[in-house]
Image (cartoon, coloured by chain):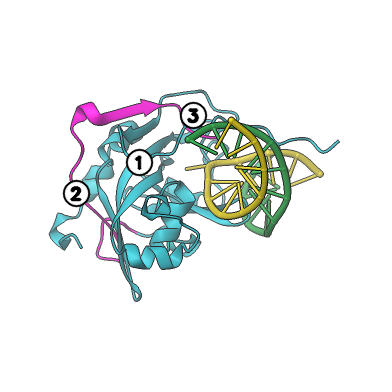
Chain colours: A cyan, B green, C yellow
DNA sequence: GGCACGATCGGCT
DNA sequence: GCCGATCGTGCCC
């Protein structure tokens, strides 16, 4: 497990979401629970930028669900979707500016035994955190972790890790959004097996 | 490897 | 009511 002194400072998140997002690649997210600790090395993230981004949950203003995005940087926004999954974001920028960086994929570098127990359907280690809902399931993050401070001494922390050389960072359109422009706000590490393949949004089939 | 489809419920219009 | 910042299974190549 990374040393506590390796934690990212809060100032890391006090920048624009497009500055922070690529800088998150290669960083280590740790969730230390009574069961044990799991470490995830981030390989793919997506930026969601404030009230002017139609893809953002905060586009239509503040609500009970998305309030954390309007709060201070360095906290986690966790939401529930598709009736069964959770996804997690990291909040950036100044208080009042609703932002989030969705953690889309990671490589589990420590605690993979525990992660496999939490994700018995994963066929192999690569699938433990390939995809945003899989990632939070390996880390056992749920809606009860919404608002948690990732820059403090709590169970959920983020550490420096080893960012990839700049030439290995790729960008492209985000995944699965209906009403948002194709901004290149998805960032990933080139050649990582845990990065999900691009899937454009497909409208639901109408039952006539 | 890729593609189609069903599951399942909270949030929002 | 509608739809989603998704995943697992089944089937085909």
Q: Chain of mark 2?
A: A
Place residue A84 in its image quadrant. bottom right
Q: Which residue is mark 1?
A: A193
The image position of residue A196, as x and y in percent, is 43, 39
Give the residue drawn at x 33%, y 47%.
A73
Give residue A61's quadrant in the image.
Answer: top right
The dot on residue A58 is: none
Discs 1/3, front: 1
| Mark 2 or 3: the one toward you | 2
Please state, as top left, top right, bottom left or bottom right, where the N terminus of chain A lies in the image.
bottom left
Check if residue A22 falls in the magenta segment.
no
Residue at 41%, 37% (x, y): give it. A46
Q: Is residue A9 left or right of residue A101?
A: left
Viewer can see residue A146:
no
**Dot 1: few (<14), some (14–19), or many (≥20) neighbours within 10 Å?**
some
Which residue occupies 82% across, 38% down?
Answer: A207
Label 3 marks which chain's residue?
A
Q: Which residues are magenta?
A: A149-176
């Amino acid at each position: 497990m990374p040393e506590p002194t390796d934690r990212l400072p809060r100032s890391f998140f006090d920048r624009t979401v497009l500055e922070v997002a690529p800088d998150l690649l290669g960083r280590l997210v740790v969730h230390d629970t009574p069961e044990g600790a799991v470490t995830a090395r981030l390989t793919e993230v997506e930026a969601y930028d404030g009230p002017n981004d139609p893809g953002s949950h905060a586009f239509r203003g503040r609500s009970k669900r998305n309030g954390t995005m309007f709060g201070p940087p360095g906290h986690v926004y966790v939401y529930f979707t598709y009736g069964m999954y959770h996804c997690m974001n990291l909040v950036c920028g100044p208080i009042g500016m609703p932002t989030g960086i969705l953690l889309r994929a990671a490589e589990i570098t420590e605690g993979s035994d525990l992660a496999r127990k939490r994700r018995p359907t994963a066929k192999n280690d690569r699938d433990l955190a390939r995809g945003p809902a899989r990632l939070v399931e390996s880390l056992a993050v749920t809606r009860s972790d919404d608002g948690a401070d990732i820059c403090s001494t709590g169970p959920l922390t983020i550490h420096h890790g080893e960012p990839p050389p700049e030439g290995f960072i790729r960008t492209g359109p985000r995944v699965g959004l209906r009403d948002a422009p194709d901004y290149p706000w998805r960032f990933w590490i080139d050649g990582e097996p845990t990065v999900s393949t691009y899937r454009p949004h497909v409208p639901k089939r109408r039952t006539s």
